[in-house]
Image (cartoon, rainbow, N blue to C red):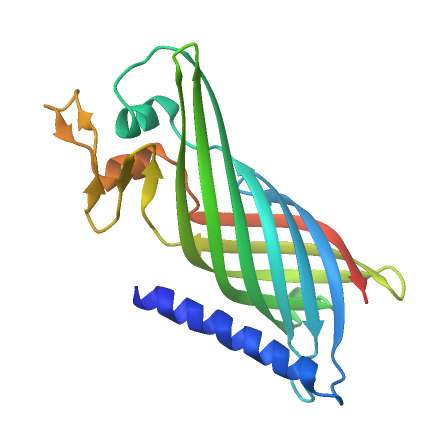
Amino acid sequence: MKMKRILILTVFFMSSLTFMLEAQTKTSSKTSVSIQTGYNRGYGLMGSFTIHRLAEGLNGNLRFSIGMNWMDPGIGLEARRVFINNNTNGTLEKEGKSYDFRVDYMTPTHILNLKNSYIVFGPRYSSFKATFDFVGGNEKFDVTTQQWGIGVGLDNYYKMNKQWDISFALGMDYFFDNTLTGHDTSYSPNGESTNPRNDNQNGNTPFTYDDADAAINQPKFMPRIMVGLLYKL
């Protein structure tokens, strides 16, 4: 909970800073928009808006991004046992998708002798949904969670012309555990559960958050390797 408050305050501070800078008539900040695609623990797509050179003497950039990622949602039969029932009939079809929202402060660096590169870091927020459909078994259900996280990375840009750059990004995000909810059942990291199912393979003891966590591949460590285009406004 303390970490969640810190992340919320960080986003609020950065947003307030942006609005104050835009209100200054003598600001020299420039802006850009970009789109990136590539690997983000699955296929990922991300759009961004960046404010360059926030103030005189402050060379860093502030970037706001929204992304969508498609990934393996988890182990279907285990998810069914933990959230629905112990049946095994039907042919499994599954899909995992997450939307993430991020704020990055981008500080210039000359690491690896790259000319136009930045170390990026900041808070993240993810909304994840895993869908499991047992075709012929009359069972289709979603498991969802919302998580806060933090991330760090290295971005590099290569100028094509006055308006366009090619971008390359390497990074790692980490998302904190939160309640997993599916059908009428939920499991929380603090040990609280709502309508937990019983494990018929272990003396009918109730399933726990660890069982749900093992069945569902919600975002945790999220490595990113992405490429894209940046357009200067």
In the rendered image, which quarter is residue 186 located in?
top left
Q: Position of residue 84 (x, y in %)?
A: 29, 25
Side of 173 relative to 160 (left or right): left
Q: Position of residue 213 (x, y in %)?
A: 31, 39
**Residue positioned 67% across, 59% down in the render:** 48
Side of 191 relative to 111 (left or right): left
**Residue positioned 42% across, 57% down in the render:** 148
Side of 182 relative to 119 (left or right): left
Q: How many numbered discs, if any? A: 0
Which of 92 and 43 lies nearest the eye of the viewer?
A: 92
Vertical arrangement, residue 108 with respect to residue 66, above or below: below
- Quadrant where the C terminus sits is bottom right
Q: Position of residue 60 (x, y in %)?
A: 64, 77
**Residue positioned 25% across, 18% down in the render:** 86
Which of 88 and 111 lies nearest the eye of the viewer?
A: 88
- Quadrant where the N terminus sits is bottom left
Q: Position of residue 42 (x, y in %)?
A: 55, 38
